Image: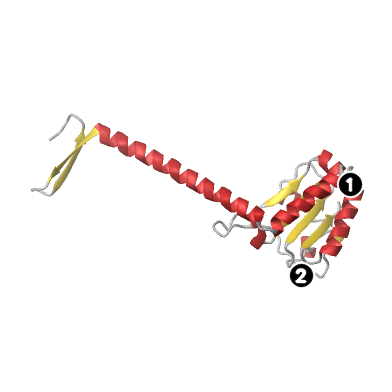
Amino acid sequence: MELLFRPSTLVKAAVKDLKLASDVPNNCKVYVFYLPALLKDYADLKEELYKAGVTAENNIFVGIWSMGAPDLTNVLSNFNVNRPPAIVIFAAPEFSTPENNPKITAYARIDNQTLLADKAKASDCINETCSLFLQGKIKQGVSNVTNDQYKSSIEHYLQKISSVISKFLNEHSITFDVTKGQVIIAPAGNSP
């Protein structure tokens, strides 16, 4: 996934009432967004996130999006959030994008309402996810998956080619005439 906005640089590591994508700094390693819903609000969790963002400085940016934010609809769409509230965690390319496939960017979306309602469990999940991004394990996992998918698609392609070639060879006779410099291919049973 490619970010559809180009953030500007800020000195803030946490924004409590985020309204514009341009308010998101581009110099952080990991980004945590709280995306609100109209009627559900996990105030305790939002406050914990904000405090964590203040102390994390440039390692982790925390943005608490405002319901009235003009860019909120785009952010919800970009991260496929169908049931807010949700938390989205993503990272700078060096922590989320495999070198062998720069078009892929990993992100985590936490939208399970039972998990979000339990501040302790949600905090553990968010901490662990941020830690995995910072350690490069998410990037490595995405890289391994894309390598496995590539290998699998190549194997599938080679199997198809092999079966087509095998079928062709079974249905045709091939004659090499060295004296005339010819290769004659004819349907089986119709040899020249």
Q: How far across and down, in percent of the image, does residue 145 sit?
A: 57, 48
Q: What amino acid does circle 2 point to?
A: Thr
Quadrant of the rendered structure where residue 166 is? top left
The image quadrant of residue 157 is top left
How packed is label 1: few (under 14 Cα within 10 Å), some, or many (20 or more)?
A: some
Q: Using the rendered image of the protein, determine whether residue 15 is visible from the camera's viewpoint.
A: yes
Labelled pair 2, 1 in contact (Cβ < 8 Å): no
Cα distance between the residues tagged 2 and 1: 28 Å
Q: How many marks?
A: 2
Residue name at image x 26 percent, y 32 percent = 171
Q: Is 140 placed above or below 83 here?
A: below
Query: Foreground: 192 or 130?
Result: 130
Crowding at dot 2, Cα within 10 Å, few <14 / some 14-19 / many 20+, comes out as few
Question: Mark 2 falls on what kind of element?
Answer: loop
Q: Nearer the viewer, residue 71 or 13?
A: 13
For the question of whether residue 17 can be seen, the reply is no
| Vertical relation: 48 (above or below) 10 | above
**Is residue 173 found left or right of 132 in the rendered image?**
left
Q: Name the amino acid type tagged 1.
A: Tyr
- Earlier residue among tags 2 and 1: 2
39 relative to 4 in the view: left or right: right
Secondary structure beneath disc 1? loop
- Left of 176 or right of it: where is 36? right
| Percent x, y of residue 25 | 77, 66
Question: In the image as oriented, which residue stretches furthest toward the top?
Answer: 189
| Residue 9 - label | 2
Residue 146: x and y, percent?
55, 50
Residue drawn at point x = 73 percent, y = 66 percent: 26
Q: x, y (%) of residue 51?
A: 88, 59
* Circle 1 residue: 42
